Structure formats: C-alpha cells, structure tokens
Image (cartoon, rainbow, N blue to C red):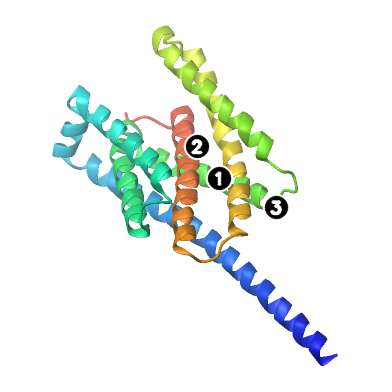
C-alpha cells in the first residue's frame, strides 16, 4: 500500500511537472509576442516622429521596398534556420524583424488619428483574445481548417495582385473582409497548434527557439487583424 501511494505521488508529481512545463512554454510564447508588439509600437512611433527616417522610407520609391524585402528575407531565414542557429541569433532576428515591421507601420500615425489607432488596437486585441480562448478550449481539431485557411490566404494574395490592375474599391473591400476572416481563423488554429507543441516541451534550447517561432506566428496574426480593421474602420487625419 505504501509503495502504491508513493507511485501515485510520483506519477502526480511528474504530471504536475509536465503541466508546469507546458504552461511555461505557452507563457513564453505570448511573452515574446507581447514584447514584439511593444517593440514594433515604439519603432513605429519613433520613425513617425523622425523626419530623417520618414524621408528615407517614404521619400523615395526604394525605401519602403528595401524594408519590405528585408522583412521577408529575415522572416523566411528565421523560419528555415531555426534548428541550426543559436537561441541568441533567433532572438536578435526576431527583435530585428519587430523593429523593421514597426518602421513600415510608421505611416499609420500620419494617415490615422491616434485615438482611432488606439480604438482599433483594442478591438483587435479583443478579437484576437476571443479566438485565442476558442483555440485553447475547443474540442474541434482545426488541422483541416488550417489547411483551407492557408489556401485561402494564397488566393487572397493572388486577388490582391490582380486588383493592382483593376483598382476596384469593391474588390478591395471584399479582399479585406476575406483576409480578416482568414487571420481570425488562423489565430485559433495557431493557438491550438501551440497548445499541442507545448505538450512536447522538454525545456531544451530547441524549444526555447520554437517558442520564438510560435510567437512570430501569433504576432503576424495579430498585426494583420489590426491593419485590416484599421483600413476598414480607421479614421483618417483631417
């Protein structure tokens, strides 16, 4: 009886350790995401108030293009090399991407009122939070949904490129709504995926880097929701 009690206690302890490791991993993911949002926010605000940086980015046709290409290269490199690079390199790349993204966001402080940006940010946070909760607690497996959402995202990219030729405001509005729906769905899908990944967490450096990649995915979900809502409902500067 004593042996059985000890075994039960040890089993419970191991289970508690696993659950604690899972919670730690998830907390780290959302912590990194929050850090990225703060960095991007300060980067955008600083850039918007710097005549030199604004002129460098928006004063020529190549400034914004250079930033966009740099962001794409950095995010693809980080995703492809995450198992090879060190945690320090992954962290620097993640922070660098957040800074570059913030610099490209700087135009919103010129185009929209601060109050409008703040309201849309709160609405985005509420929407993101709701879908995160759904992704955490739903019993429905979202794997197949995620595949369809990714297919839809590629379709949206193609439609957006085509609309550069047609310049249709109606098509642009429809694309924005569809894109919003896709990233709302991806938020729930990515959340469920992160919960599943957390169950394999062993506290190694590999999983510390995986936490950064997971944070990047959630960061992109939130940023896209925010920008689409801002385009749809943001109030422009008078």
Classed neighbour count for the residue bearing mark 2: other residues with Cα under 10 Å, few (<14), some (14–19), many (≥20): many
Q: Residue, x 18% and y 42% (percent of image)?
A: 50
Image quadrant in which the C terminus is located:
top left
Q: Residue, x 74% and y 83% (percent of image)?
A: 9
Residue 109: in sight, yes or no?
no
Q: Mark number for residue 128?
A: 1
Residue 51 point in image, percent of width and height = 15, 38
Residue 7: in sight, yes or no?
yes
Secondary structure of the residue carrying tag 3 is helix
Q: Against 127, is 164 above or below?
A: above
Secondary structure of the residue carrying tag 1 is helix
Secondary structure of the residue carrying tag 2 is helix
Residue 213 point in image, percent of width and height = 46, 49
Q: Name the residue under label 2.
A: 225
Image quadrant in which the N terminus is located:
bottom right
Q: Mark 3 points at which residue?
A: 137
Spatial separation of the CA atoms under disc 1 and disc 3: 14 Å
Pick the front one: 200 or 138: 200
Residue 169 point in image, percent of width and height = 46, 14
Badge 1 or badge 3: first in the primary sequence? 1
Badge 2 or badge 3: first in the primary sequence? 3
> Taking 115 as reference, is 9 left or right?
right
Query: Residue at the right extreme?
Result: 1
Spatial separation of the CA atoms under disc 2 and disc 1: 8 Å
Q: Residue, x 54% and y 21% (percent of image)?
A: 155
């Amino acid at each position: 009886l004593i042996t059985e009690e000890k075994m039960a206690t040890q089993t419970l302890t191991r289970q508690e350790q696993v659950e604690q490791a899972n919670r730690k991993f998830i907390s780290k993911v959302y912590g990194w995401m929050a850090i990225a949002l703060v960095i991007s926010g300060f980067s955008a605000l600083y850039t918007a108030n710097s005549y030199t940086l604004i002129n460098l980015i928006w004063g020529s046709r190549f400034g914004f293009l250079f930033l966009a290409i740099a962001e794409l290269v950095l995010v693809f490199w980080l995703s492809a090399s995450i198992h090879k690079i060190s945690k320090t390199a992954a962290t620097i790349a993640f922070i660098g991407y957040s800074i570059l993204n913030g610099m490209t966001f700087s135009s919103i402080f010129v185009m929209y009122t601060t109050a409008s940006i703040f309201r849309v940010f709160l609405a985005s946070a509420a929407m993101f939070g709701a879908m995160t909760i759904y992704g955490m607690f739903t019993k429905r497996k979202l794997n197949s949904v995620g595949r369809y959402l990714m297919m839809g995202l590629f379709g949206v990219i193609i439609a957006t490129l085509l609309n550069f030729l047609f310049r249709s405001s109606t098509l642009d509005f429809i694309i924005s709504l569809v894109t919003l729906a896709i990233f709302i769905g991806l938020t729930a899908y990515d959340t469920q995926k992160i919960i599943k990944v957390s169950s394999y967490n062993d506290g190694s450096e590999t999983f510390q880097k995986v936490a950064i990649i997971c944070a990047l995915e959630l960061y992109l979900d939130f940023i896209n929701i925010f920008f689409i809502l801002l385009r749809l409902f943001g109030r422009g500067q008078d």
